[in-house]
């Protein structure tokens, strides 16, 4: 297990350094009520008093209920400023403008991209940096939206697996409900990360941390990893290779 006291100190120092280099006035992040945003919010608040968590319901019923309740609980416990930006009407207008021919994947990716647009609007208006909330497990599987939750100015937890995220939250004394509920991006009612991927985070983490995976699980992970490689590569720019 990691030394989470040392991890806390190092990550807080990292956040402060990036803020100083950017001469930013503060931080903004998406406070979704999940494990990753909880850890990011706690660390950012330790690093910067001017930390803002934005709750952005976007069409899913649970966004207004369990997710928002958990988001507020973390914010209250750790003294994090909160703001709500309801994007449901914006999503509905976007769907109406695009027509009815969108695939389920295209529809699901609208919410993360609208949320990131909202975060960058707040950041630009208030001189803040946008902090990402993705973890290593999601990164390996490509379980994030390109130019949605995959866009940010810095990410203090991107090297941590889901298993380590839970350990870190327990160390910091985060609410038990955050740790115990099934991970979900809240993109639609009933959605969970593990059901969508068809594999558990525990299995993914066992492979990432210890190199263990049976043939079937490894095949699933390889398929996701290879199909999402474009998400992890820098944008291709003509002539950049020669420069």
Image (tube, rainbow, N blue to C red):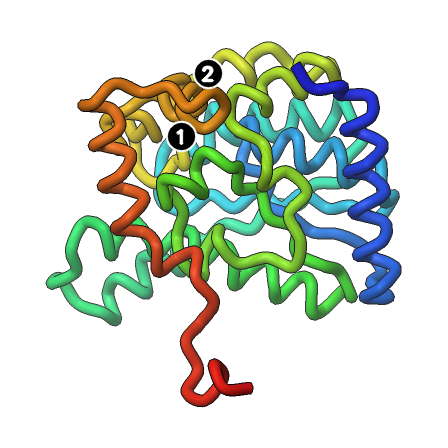
Pick the front one: 161 or 114: 161
> Which residue is painted at 60% across and 10% down in the image?
176
Q: In the rendered image, which quarter is residue 218 located in?
A: top left
Residue furthest out toward the left: 101
Q: Is residue 26 or residue 59 the one in the foreground? A: 26
Tell me how far mark 2 sits from mark 1, CA to CA: 9 Å
Q: Which residue is painted at 52% across and 63% down in the image?
A: 117
Q: Which residue is mark 2?
A: 181
Residue 21 position in % (x across, y down): 85, 64
Q: Residue at x 58, y 41 (%)?
A: 158
Near mark 1 (Cα within 10 A), the count class, few <14, some 14-19 or many ≥20, is many
Quadrant, the N terminus: top right
The image's mark for residue 184 is 1
Query: Quick check: 196 left or right of 178?
Result: left
- As helix, strand or loop, the secondary structure at mark 1 comes to loop
Vertically, is 136 above or below 239?
A: above
Name the element at disc 2: loop
Q: Please provide percent x and percent y for residue 28.
A: 69, 51
Pointers 2 and 1 in contact (CB under 8 A)? yes
- Residue 239 lies, in percent from the top left, at 45, 89
Residue at figure coordinates x 78%, y 45% from the top left: 51
- Residue 170: mark: none
Question: In the figure, is residue 37 to the left or right of 2?
Answer: left
Q: Indicate the quadrant containing the C terminus: top left, top right, bottom left or bottom right.
A: bottom right
Is the residue marked by circle 2 packed among few (<14), some (14-19), or many (20+) residues within 10 Å?
Answer: few
């Amino acid at each position: 297990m990691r030394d989470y006291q040392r991890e806390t100190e190092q990550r807080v120092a990292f956040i402060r350094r990036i803020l100083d280099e950017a001469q930013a006035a503060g931080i903004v992040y998406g406070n979704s009520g999940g494990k990753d945003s909880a850890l990011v919010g706690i660390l950012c608040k330790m690093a910067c008093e001017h930390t803002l968590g934005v709750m952005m319901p976007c069409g899913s019923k649970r966004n207004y209920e369990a997710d928002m309740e958990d988001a507020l609980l973390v914010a209250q416990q750790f003294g994090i400023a909160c703001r709500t930006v309801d994007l449901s009407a914006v999503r509905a207008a976007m769907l109406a403008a695009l027509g009815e021919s969108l695939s389920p994947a295209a529809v699901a990716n609208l919410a993360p991209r609208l949320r990131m647009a909202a975060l960058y609007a707040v950041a630009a208006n208030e001189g803040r940096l946008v902090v990402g909330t993705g973890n290593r497990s999601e990164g390996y599987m490509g379980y994030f939206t390109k130019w949605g939750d995959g866009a940010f100015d810095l990410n203090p937890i991107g090297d941590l697996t889901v298993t380590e995220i839970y350990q870190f939250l327990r160390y910091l004394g985060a609410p038990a409900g955050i740790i115990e509920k099934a991970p979900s991006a809240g993109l639609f009612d009933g959605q969970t990360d593990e059901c969508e991927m068809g594999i558990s985070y525990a299995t993914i983490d066992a492979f990432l941390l210890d190199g263990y995976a049976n043939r079937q699980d490894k095949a699933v992970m390889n398929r996701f990893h290879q199909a999402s490689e474009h998400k992890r590569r820098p944008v291709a720019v003509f002539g950049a290779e020669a420069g």
